[in-house]
Image (cartoon, helix red, strand yellow):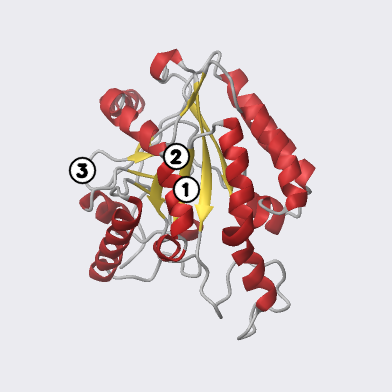
Amino acid sequence: MGPLEREPYRHWPIDGRPELRYPGGKVLACYVALNIERFDLGRPATSRTGVTAGLPVDPLNHGWRDYGARVGFWRLLEALDRFELPVSTLLNADAALAYPEIVAAGRERGWAFLGHGRSNSELWTGFDRDTERAALREIVRVLTETTGARPRGWLGPALTETANTLGLLAELGFTYSLDWIVDDQPVPLDAGGTPFLSVPYSIEINDIPAFVDQGLTPAQFTELVVDQFEVLHAEAARRPGAVFSVSLHPFLVGQPFRHKHLLTALEAISGHHDVWYANTDEIARWFLADRYEQATQAIDEHHRRTT
């Protein structure tokens, strides 16, 4: 297994593309990416502090992460219900088995469930093709049995892939990935000849980089979320078709002192008449049916003009 020989997409500047309006003439799509993750006991992962992260028994960091499934999720659930925001659930297979109450809450609300690896203590790398295919098949089986629907979308843990991942995803019935964060709009990805999409996801409008990597305050994260939404919303008047996403982890924004400020952000992005509030399954399904052929033709035409 070697590196990719090229990117799984072709260069296509956003300026000059066919106008992209969503159902009902909406100019911007919006969803919440909710990470429901399981962390293996005794293995380093996202940590509050590195002081204890390498110890064989690490109550500090493991307990901090587990708080999300026990408490933080339920606080966040009330807010998502209050503002009626669509959710795409990035679900580890191990989390689907460990947290049936969370899966049940999502099923009741019609959330999308995306594959998100086995656990968030394992990056999606280092597989040969057959081993990766078998691992993906097992994830599909677990998510189908626990959520009641076969997953169509994928986000690798920490946005990781192998050179074979996209082709194997397409082979197993997936239709889109969030890993390739190259665009504000849905765009085609090369998955070996099968129609396949990149649906926009943000690694910056995301509470892990904001709080863990950059040390932002809750108020600063709220400002980040609102500014991103307001700029995309304003641009949509002249260039419609962007997708706004905010990525949340219950062990972070589910903490009371952060949650207070998150409510301000969620209120600011909700309730706009010209925004399509849709999860990523809905966005991908609509784009593949209504705009995929137009997009591929436009990309071909762009390359004919420029090469």
Does label 3 or label 2 sit earlier along the sequence? Answer: 2
- The answer to whether residue 249 is visible is no
- Residue found 36% across the figure and 61% down from its top: 162
Does label 1 or label 3 sit earlier along the sequence? Answer: 1
For label 2, the residue is: 109
Q: Secondary structure at mark 2?
A: helix
Q: CA distance from mark 3 to mark 2?
A: 34 Å
Q: Quadrant of residue 24?
A: top left
Q: Are marks 3 and 2 in contact (CB under 8 Å)?
A: no
> Quick check: 14 above or below 219?
above
Q: Quadrant of residue 117?
A: bottom left
Say which amino acid is labelled 2: Arg
For label 1, the residue is: 105
Instruction: Tell me the quarter of the image containing the N terminus.
Output: bottom left
Question: In terms of depth relative to the viewer, which is nearer, 256 or 258?
Answer: 256
Q: Are marks 2 and 1 in contact (CB under 8 Å)?
A: yes
Q: CA distance from mark 2 to mark 1?
A: 6 Å
Classify mark 3: residues with Cα within 10 Å, few (<14), some (14-19) or many (20+). few
Classify mark 2: residues with Cα within 10 Å, few (<14), some (14-19) or many (20+). few
> Quick check: 36 above or below 262?
below
Provide residue 228's location: percent of width, then percent of height: 64, 32
As drawn, is 132 to the left or to the right of 120? left
Instruction: Tell me the quarter of the image containing the C terminus.
Output: top left
For label 3, the residue is: 193
